[in-house]
Amino acid sequence: MIFFVSDLHLSAQTPTLTRIFLDFLGSRARAAEALYILGDLFEYWVGDDDLEDPANAAIAGALRELSDSGVELNIMRGNRDFLFGERFAAATGARLLTDPHVLSLPAWQFVLSHGDMLCTDDAEYQAFRTQSRAAEWQTAFLAKPLAERRAIARALREQSEAGKHEKAQGNNAYLMDLNPGATEDFLRDHGYATFIHGHTHRPATHDHIVDGISVERWVLSDWHEGDGPVRAECLVWDGEQLSREKLT
């Protein structure tokens, strides 16, 4: 089996989700051949020196125990934790994936992505994404004191949440989803492989017809606690088909 998750957004403010994730790593995930975390494991990640935070250290330690048990651990950077570096990889035993990543299996082929690169209608976000992935920007940011970086991340998170609310209230909800044309081009460029991604917090299974070929797109569920029921879910490949599995 192979498990896929994304958009857990773990932090000190999500104790229930953190407990569910740690339980998952210590039990259900041990039955897997591999675990793929496709971005936004943490609510924000401001540099690998934040591994010293007790909550972050506990999660990293549990990931290390999973990888030491023989499960192949693969982690993709998301829009909240794009600053994962080699120290984090060494601490967890994870392989850091490039985005996108082609996963070729004996029975099927997948293409994996966080998904944010295809939200091309949101020009403001794409401009920030380009800026924040640049080596010069990251070097300057990581040179700041840890406390300042955390404060900047919190401010950016609040700005992002306010922007989402504003878009959801108007006619701009499409900005938070994948652009249809960019998605079709992406599927074509990757050989019509089954596409798995997160980011949009809109779990669903879509059937695209690209050049007359039917291509599935599976959107991973975000994890959520707070108002309403707790949501924690993984996608499972059993060697023949994909299915969603609730972890609550």
Image (cartoon, rainbow, N blue to C red):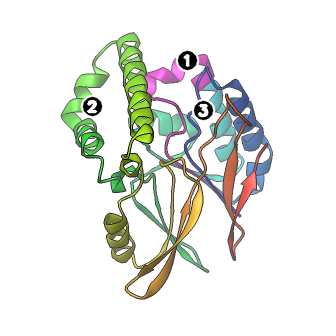
Mark 1: secondary structure: loop
Disc 3 from disc 1: Cα separation: 10 Å
Region rendered in magenta: 36-56
Rendered residue at 30%/47% (across/down):
122
Distance between the alpha carbons at the discs numbered 2 and 1: 21 Å
Q: Is residue 11 magenta?
A: no
Residue sitting nearer the eye, 117 or 206: 206
Tell me, yes or no, whether the two marked residues, 3 and 2, touch with CB atoms within 8 Å: no
For marks 2 and 1 on the same chain, the one whose residue lies earlier in the sequence = 1
Q: Amino acid at mark 3?
A: Ala
**Mark 3 touches mark 1? (CB < 8 Å):** no
Q: Which residue is mark 1?
A: 53
| Residue shown at 74% from the left, 31% from the top | 19
Q: Secondary structure at mark 2?
A: helix
Instruction: Tell me which residue sits at (35%, 60%) in the image.
Output: 179
Residue 21, percent across and down?
A: 70, 38
Q: Residues within 10 Å of mark 2 (few under 14, many from 20)?
A: some
The residue that disc 2 covers is 138
For the residue pair 136 and 150, the one nearer the viewer reads as 150
Task: Identify which amino acid the numbered label 1 is placed on.
Answer: Asp
Crowd tier of the residue under label 1, counting other residues whose Cα lies within 10 Å: few below 14, some 14–19, many 20 or above: few
Q: Residues within 10 Å of mark 3 (few under 14, many from 20)?
A: many
Label ID, residue 161? none
Q: Is residue 130 above or below residue 196?
A: above
Specify the quadrant that holds the C terminus: top right
Identify the residue shown where x is 44% and y is 38%: 169
Can residue 224 be seen from the camera position used here? yes
For residue 60, which numbered disc appears in the image? 3
Whole-percent x and y of residue 40? Answer: 50, 40
**Residue 65 locus on image (x, y percent):** 69, 39
